Image (spheres, rainbow, N blue to C red):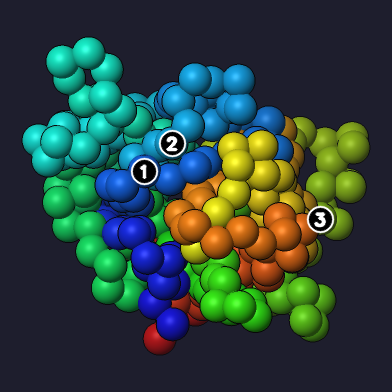
Amino acid sequence: MKGLTDIPGIAVGHASDYDGLTGCTVILCEQGAVAGGDIRGGATGTQEWDLLSPMNVTDRIHGVCLAGRSVFGLEAASGARRFLEHKGVGFKFGPVKVPLVVGAILFDFAVGKPAIRPSREMGEAAAAAATDAAVEEGAVGAGTGATVGKALGMKNAMKSGIGSYTVDLPGGFKVSALAAVNAAGDVKDPATGKIVAGARKTPDGMEFADGARLMKLRAVQPAPARENTSLVVVATNASLTKVEANKLAQLASLGMARSIDPVNTMNDGDLVVALSLGEKRAPVDALGVAAAEAVVGAILRAVRLAPTLGGIPGLKK
């Protein structure tokens, strides 16, 4: 299993700054992909999101750029566009081709050096590094500074990162997910219901405090800072319309709800982008079930493959 690059036509590249503890991840689909999106979080930062709407005249996009450092990270998407323009990839518009790249960001200012941000050059480097080899996972790209479990603040949080996972279906269909997990909540394994990574009761311990329980107590206490957001890209080798791609994104978001608790809060900008690359039709509901499963797998891998970094403990030894 290679993760998101199991889908033919998808390439993934990362650029990581381990001094600043931030980075960006670029997903390329140079031949164009029918795309849709779903936003469930209350603090989202995006660029060119309207490209995903069925009301938009364009029927395909050419890439997605995920980045850290909140709104400043949106600059990285311009680097991915520049890379694609130099390759002659884009939507034909008069005498030029315009690459259509959707950007989305997460908030990782709480780690590393805040003055270091994903730049246009970093976005271009991530695009240039994109390959159809197995997706590199852990504390890389947009997941370099990612953390989870912030119910008791950063001193009790845990390291997270990038994860990717594929689900196979009959008929040769595949649905894959890539997740940059920077959640306010805890990550749980739906198979056991147990917390895998999240808010720890003490800064030097590994006993979990249960972020959802703490949030209920905050009915009369201040809420945690809005320093989060999990970003997901799902892709399939099935052929979908733009409306169906939007539905696939909605169904895929259920995987986030199953594995992050609490999720989609006012302190998160959680979203899903769905990509369709293929010529053979498949029922979107079946693909959606697989997409939710793939998202769960990607989120679990994001925390299980994240090492200790920046003084924040991770699960990878």
Q: CA distance from mark 1 to mark 3?
A: 40 Å
Q: CA distance from mark 1 to mark 2?
A: 5 Å
Residue labelled with disc 2: 60
- Image coordinates for residue 32, horizontal then vertical, percent: 36, 43
Q: Nearer the viewer, mark 3 or mark 2?
A: 2
Lower position in the chain sequence, tag 1 or tag 2: 1
Give the SS element for disc 3: helix
- Asked if the residue at tag 2 contacts the one at tag 1, i.e. Cβ–Cβ closer than 8 Å, the answer is yes
- Image coordinates for residue 58, horizontal then vertical, percent: 45, 25
- Image coordinates for residue 116, horizontal then vertical, percent: 23, 38
Tell me: 246 left or right of 28.
Answer: right
Lower position in the chain sequence, tag 3 or tag 2: 2
Dividing the picture into quadrants, the one containing residue 252 is bottom right
- Image coordinates for residue 267, horizontal then vertical, percent: 66, 36
Q: Residues within 10 Å of mark 3 (few under 14, many from 20)?
A: some
Give the SS element for disc 2: loop
Residue labelled with disc 3: 212
The amino acid on which the numbered mark 1 sits, given as a three-letter code, is Gly
Give the SS element for disc 1: strand
Q: 95 or 23: nearer the eye?
A: 95
Q: 295 or 208: nearer the eye?
A: 295
The amino acid on which the numbered mark 3 sits, given as a three-letter code, is Ala
Where is 195 relative to 97, above or below? below
Dividing the picture into quadrants, the one containing residue 121 is top left
The residue depicted at 50 percent of the width and 49 percent of the height is 275
